[in-house]
Amino acid sequence: MNETTLVGICIWIYLASWVLYLVHSIVRHKGSGRAADVLALSGLLLHTVSIALRWVESHRLGIGHAPFSNLYESMLFFSWTIVLIYLISLKRLQSRLLGAVVMPLGFLALASTSLMDREIQPLVPALQSNWLTAHVITCFLGYAAFAVAFGVSLLYLWKVKELKVKEKARGVSEDSLFRRLPSAEVLDEFSYRIIGVGFPLLTLGIVTGAAWANSAWGSYWSWDPKETWSLIVWLIYAAYLHARIARGWRGRRSAWLSVVGFCATLFCYLGVNLLLSGLHSYGTG
Amino acid sequence: MDTQNQGKNNRLYEVLSNTRLTVFLCILLAVVSILGTLVPQNAPPAEYEARYGQAGTRILGALGLLDLYHSVGFVFLLSFLALNLAACTLKRFPNVWRALRRTRTAATDFTFKDWKNQETLLLRGQPREIEGELERVLPKFFGKPARLPALEGQVGIERFERNRFARLGPYIAHMSLIVILLGGLTGALFGFKGALTLREGEETSVAWLQEGGQQIELGFRIRCNRFVFEQYPNGSPKEYRSEVTLLDETGATIRDAAIRVNHPLSHNGIGFYQSTYGSSPELVLVAQHNESGETIEVRAELNRPFALPGGQGVRALALEFKENLVIPAEMARISSFSRENLGPAVRIVIFDEKGFQDPFWILKDFAELDRKRQSPYHFILSDFRLVPYTGLQVAKDPGAFLVWIGCTFLVIGFLISLLMDHEIVWVSREWCGEKELRVHLAGRAVRHPMGYAGRFERRKALLRKRLAPWLKAPQDAVAKDRRGKKVG
């Protein structure tokens, strides 16, 4: 049982979990909701084992390093953090409808690794740093929080849109899906809390990245596209956090900021490496 | 100051300290920053002209997009955000500070009437036992008590609070941002970024600045004794290390050090970072002036001019060296060469005050070939040696420590804001008769009231457990309203 096989199984488990969450959302079948939870959790456990296996394997090959050094390893870790933060959020928010919008992100992230080069490569000198591990872990935990906030904001926007529709129709809501979603207020508060967790993590990620850049290249900030995009993401979420106390920015506008913020996060992670060039271009390996 | 000016100043202050401005500036800065990632920054002019043409390059330059992050507009936006930050803090902080220092708060009937988290407990038993237990248990669950004067009647009210200083969290974080910006500004104004290359055995006291290409004196000398390069079995670099010695102006050794990637050397505030490496050729050339027959042997390095024999004031320099010059197969066939790999070769150019002549290649393995070239001078490449060199980044940043302090407190500010919340719980105790005590609790959290509800419930349950020996049956408590007065 090696890492590749385990990851392959995980992909299918996450897919099944997502499908069951969808079924649970649409058909209101409680059993499928519980099964989806169990699948997500067991998938995460297997996922953890596969990351550990890769770490161990790298040591066996004599080029031991924490599995955070290239695109494949980072995506493997990112999908792990998404499912982890999702499961924690599920416990706090108590709404399985979150799974229908967030599990697909975890599934797609992990599935995309099958297109990538999985070979364990030794670390070039620039990557031989403890800052690397801290930087990758904090950044991706932050990204995962933003991914969950993205899902919550989508649910919020849908709920608010439906509220408006029902107001106009003035009829009694027959839509059980609508009623089963937590209230717009709860969703809004939750996305604020989770971004309130993700934002400091991203800040730590940027700070550890700057410390690493300083030790490797003598400059903690060089306006490299990757660095700049991480600042762009940071600014968008800073705007989000302040939008709560800024008149007229609460509610729908904030939710859209959260959605845009996650798109910017994805571009920062993938778009910069794959479409632009700079110091971070090794990440395409 | 007349009232009109004062009115204008107040309005300006109101605008500057508005959170909507913060939201707007953050988004604007984000959008503007995106532009700088789509256009290469500080690239050589040739690259811009190739991408955007001359006219396009001029437009982009006029808009400041070629060096966006150091442009006046961008710095202005950053400063504006800093100003907004400062104004917002100035506006809100005094109240928070006053609230923090307040130690006595009088409670009225309405202080906590509308609070969502409330609970009434009815206790029965020996007063001393109950009071004793309450004194032990309440601070444990709800924080520091501040006893207050009793209101009318026999109600003694206590205010418990926890994490009062959690409210400082956002202010610490915001001030740290300003410190970080100040640190960045200091570094930009008083620091420098440059580079230098050293061959093994070479020493220097200057570095070349990244911007502008000028030299900068280090104030001491650095000599590269050895450059070590290790590879993994698959060929990718494993480690490169420069073993250097720092010397003062008299030549005395200050210290020895090894510079590796991610392990820089620092001296007098100047940092040396292992950046790159390579090998530079050292050539032995024989140059002959045909007319006079004069021949000289030259030890040449790339791009270092040397005088040619014959006393004509003519000089030459080596432009390029290849350990093996390869020509296409067809060219090999039609020429006199019997192979494509022509061996070591150096490209030389002759020049005098009239200008540069056309450069030409000299091949080590085909020495006689140069004779065929029409020129008063002929060359032979008799020997060469590849000398490894190390490329070091050299940087000085006096603002860096400010930035790190700012980052540390930024993280601390976040942790405080996130993990701690200022919680306030009011507890009123009213003795009804000799042995029955009515305890009423009302609690709230300042920043995250919704999250607090769960915590309050848990502590309520724990409190009931602890007070179980004296707790009256719950049915009795239900018949009373929130303030414990009998209803109906």
Image (cartoon, coloured by chain):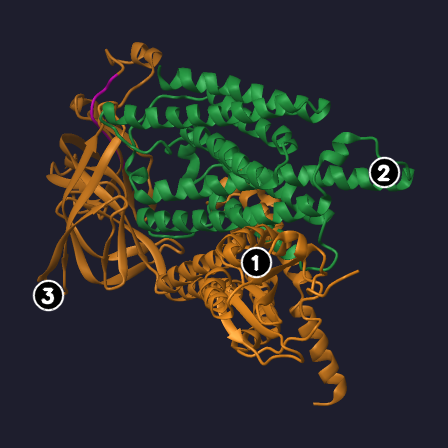
Chain colours: A green, B orange
Please check the rendered image and state whether residue A121 is part of the magenta-colored stretch, yes or no.
no
Amino acid at the residue labelled 1: Phe
Q: Are marks 1 and 2 in contact (CB under 8 Å)?
A: no
Task: For mark 1, give the secondary structure.
Answer: helix
Subunit ID for the residue under disc 3: B
Task: For mark 2, give the secondary structure.
Answer: helix
Amino acid at the residue labelled 3: Thr
Is residue B94 among what the camera can see?
yes
Subunit ID for the residue under disc 1: B
Q: Circle 1 is placed at which residue position?
A: B74
Query: What residue is drawn where x is 73% and y is 60%?
Result: A247
Q: Which mark is residue B302?
A: none
Q: Are marks 1 and 2 on the same chain?
A: no
Query: What residue is drawn where x is 47% and y is 37%?
Result: A277
User: Which quadrant, please, contains the C terminus of chain B?
Assistant: bottom right
Subunit ID for the residue under disc 2: A
Stretch in magenta: B341-348
Q: Which mark is residue A165?
A: 2
Q: Circle 3 is placed at which residue position?
A: B250
